[in-house]
Image (cartoon, rainbow, N blue to C red):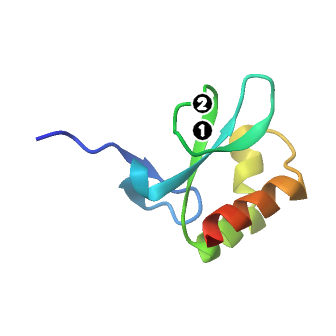
Amino acid sequence: MKKIPLRRCIGCYESKPKADLCRVVKKTDGDICIDKTGKINGRGAYICYNIECLEKAIKAKKFEREFETEISDEIYSNLRREISE
């Protein structure tokens, strides 16, 4: 039986299978993007496909703390669009 990798959502702090979460990555050049493949090099953070969870993380500035950088509204709007689909 293959082990299922678990990751913790930064919005609700629940551990869930990696495939059930959206990965946001800060690449080595400092660019922040959504990683649909899960293979982009860089620092990753995971969030549930749940808009309430995302809004909670944005309000508490969890992404900014995780990546130690300022995050633009454009990235947040891309995340909202990705999660609401």
Q: Nearer the viewer, residue 53 or 76?
A: 76
Residue 53: give x, y in percent of width and height: 60, 70
Q: Secondary structure at mark 1?
A: strand
- Give the residue displayed 41% in from the left and 51% down from the top: 19
- Give the residue displayed 77% in from the left and 58% down from the top: 78
Residue 21: give x, y in percent of width and height: 49, 56
Q: Secondary structure at mark 2?
A: loop
Question: Can you say which quadrant of the picture contains the C terminus?
Answer: bottom right
Nearer the observer, disc 1 or disc 2?
2
Residue 70: give x, y in percent of width and height: 87, 45
Amino acid under disc 1:
Gly
Disc sitting over residue 44 in the figure:
1
- Give the residue displayed 38% in from the left and 57% down from the top: 16
Left or right, 33 with reference to 2 = right
Q: Distance between the Cα atoms at labels 1 and 2?
A: 9 Å
Amino acid under disc 2:
Ile
Placement of 43 over or under 61, stated as above or below: above
Placement of 58 over or under 65, stated as above or below: below
Given contact means CB atoms under 8 Å apart, are the residues at marks 1 and 2 in contact? yes
Q: Residues within 10 Å of mark 2 (few under 14, many from 20)?
A: some
Q: Which residue is mark 2?
A: 40
Residue 6: give x, y in percent of width and height: 36, 47
